[in-house]
């Protein structure tokens, strides 16, 4: 089989939803194997159909229990689910306690659910690109809904959450400082606020604080016409999941209404992030390759900076002048 | 005054520790004003003396109270302090409640302390580069100790913490899930673990969990010869601060011991991150500029990706083939 034919077979298998082939390609993406790029190219035209939902919040707020319960609910509807866990504390990525893991196993046996976790460190390319590449694959694979779980308030994590169609900000009662963080800028990206473990002490107060903040924040939101929902859940007991699912559906309907053009704008945001990340990544790779082929290894450059034979600013300018002529 | 002379005057003022000039240059860096680059170049040879200390942990663990108390303690020694707050919940960056802010004001009046906060989003260049640029300035300015406060477990934040000489991981009792996160990979970067608000319920248990994890993790640590310290503090009451300060000094002495070459390896890590970030950033800027001058604006490319006239992977390859000939 020629390489081209092999690629087409792989692409075909993914489009048909073949789990084993998909898993292999995702691993290749993670390992940055060049052939994965050609597969991604072929898959891209088949994307754009999935509803991408980002869930973000600190460790311990119960994001994965929510993902677990939402997945059950979505499956009842007959829709298929892709799950990307970009969270070292998630049972999906293997960081959680035994009980959580056992709970998750039911989904591993369901052919309508595809689960994948991402390493949160490593490559130059970074998290945002890998996540977007993997969303491309799951979308092309035909998953109706893609749940992307990210942890915390890091810059990349916010970027990822931002490129979802619907963003859920998850918190729990009594995390006053977290509400401060939300206040400081993250609030604008939330479409639905979830107060999980809502039966805990301080639940009422947290709800009220969120309401006040949202009222305050409405003025500076880009989005018009959508007032963020605030919902209470107790994910481990399944409480509030139906309301959350209906909330997500309402947001989807809102996005799809042509008047607002919001589905489109979520698409544009992701296109932007994805394009810039791929560009950055490939630029760096190309230049490092060129440098190496002329005997200027990355390590030599770093050594120069470390020994203060050169400052990083001048050194980079020199490299650009030489390599980008 | 020629531009060159003006630059030298600015550089001179920063090296003398002039607060107003320094603040202006930091603002220029934040705004990505090109002249800031020439200043950074001139400052770079004057760096490498400061002890860079990273503090990282979730919102609400009391990082800024620790920074506050540590600053007081360091100032007693007659040493100067630079503070970079990369944390939307920090009172230094303006995200905190009134009481915290009032507490901080004492440092604003102390000429031996320079405080600066960083926006956590915005540019292509990203957080890691801005932070490293600002560390360059504060180091050149002559600050003996630079405290860098970052929030959470995001990828960028971990990278920043990693490029410090000494990294403090801050947690509080009862954040079991956070310990899971530490377990999942962040642990390797901690030199000193701080259990703040140690008087709270669950303090003993948290300490024990950390001890077990560290014992487990010692095997896979790069660093040899340094067993991570676990310290208890109650920052708002000033309890445990002396021990923390002595712990930091011990780690510095350990780093400075030539046998280990660890001070050097921290330097190499930062040189690496800084060089790659500047390279990525300048590459992207150069290419976008070239593209624009040929009538290929960034927005047009994004539009193509969005409308699926092109996939980001092929489009980037096309651009590289054209612009990097």
Image: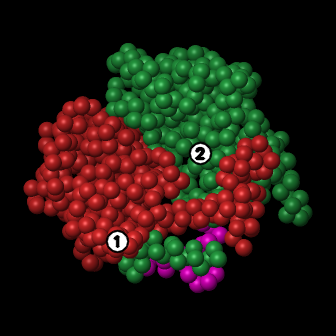
Chain colours: A green, B red
Q: Output the chain of dot 1.
A: B
Is residue A143 found left or right of A250 in the rendered image? right
- Above or below residue B148? Residue B202 is above
Q: Which mark is residue A199?
A: none
Where residue A189 sits in the image (x, y, percent)?
52, 33
Where residue B256 sits in the image (x, y, percent)?
24, 72
Is residue B163 found left or right of B53 in the rendered image? right
The image quadrant where one finds the C terminus of chain B is bottom right
Say if residue B3 shows up in the picture. Answer: yes
| Front tag of 2 and 1 | 1
Q: Secondary structure at mark 1?
A: loop
Which residue is at 19% across, 36% downward? Answer: B102
Tell which of A198 and A255 is nearer to you: A255
Is residue B113 found left or right of A318 in the rendered image? left
Say whether residue A300 is magenta.
Answer: yes
Which residue is at 63% across, 23% downward? Answer: A251
Magenta segment's dominant SS is: helix
- Give the residue at mark 1: B1
Say if residue A134 shows up in the picture. Answer: no
- Magenta stretch: give its range: A284-304
Tell which of A205 and B23 is nearer to you: B23
Q: Which mark is residue A117?
A: 2
Tell which of B152 and B251 is nearer to you: B152
Say whether residue A193 is magenta.
Answer: no
Tell which of A288 and A244 is nearer to you: A288
Q: Within 10 Å of the Cα at label 2, are there few (<14), some (14-19), or many (20+) other Cα atoms?
A: many
């Amino acid at each position: 089989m020629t390489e081209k034919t092999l690629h087409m077979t792989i692409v075909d298998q993914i489009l048909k939803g073949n789990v084993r082939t998909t898993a292999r390609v995702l691993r290749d993406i993670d390992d940055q194997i060049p052939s994965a790029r050609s597969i991604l190219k072929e898959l891209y035209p088949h994307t754009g159909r999935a509803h991408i939902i980002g869930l973000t919040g600190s460790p311990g707020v119960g994001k994965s229990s929510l993902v677990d319960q939402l997945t059950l609910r979505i499956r009842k509807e007959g829709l298929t689910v892709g799950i990307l866990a970009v969270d070292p504390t998630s049972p999906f990525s293997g960081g959680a306690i035994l009980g959580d893991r056992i709970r998750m196993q039911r989904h591993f046996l369901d052919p309508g659910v595809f689960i994948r976790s991402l390493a949160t460190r490593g490559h130059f390319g970074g998290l945002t690109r890998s996540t977007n590449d993997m969303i491309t694959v799951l979308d092309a694979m035909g998953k109706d809904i893609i749940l992307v779980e990210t942890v915390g308030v890091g810059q990349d994590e916010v970027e990822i959450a931002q490129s979802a169609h619907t963003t859920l900000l998850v918190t729990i009662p009594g995390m006053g400082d977290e509400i401060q963080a939300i206040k400081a800028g993250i609030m604008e990206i939330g479409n639905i606020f979830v107060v999980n473990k809502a039966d805990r002490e301080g639940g009422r107060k947290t709800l009220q604080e969120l309401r006040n903040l949202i009222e305050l924040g409405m003025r500076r939101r880009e989005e018009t016409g959508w007032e963020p929902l605030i919902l209470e859940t107790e994910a481990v007991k399944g409480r509030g999941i139906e309301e959350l699912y209906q909330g997500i559906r309402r947001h989807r309907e809102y996005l799809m209404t042509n008047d607002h053009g919001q589905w489109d704008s979520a698409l544009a945001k992701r296109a932007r992030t994805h394009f810039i990340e791929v560009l950055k990544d490939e630029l760096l790779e190309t230049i490092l390759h060129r440098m190496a082929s002329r005997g200027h290894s990355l390590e030599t450059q770093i050594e120069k900076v470390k020994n203060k034979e050169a400052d990083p600013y001048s050194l980079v300018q020199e490299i650009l002048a030489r390599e980008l002529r």
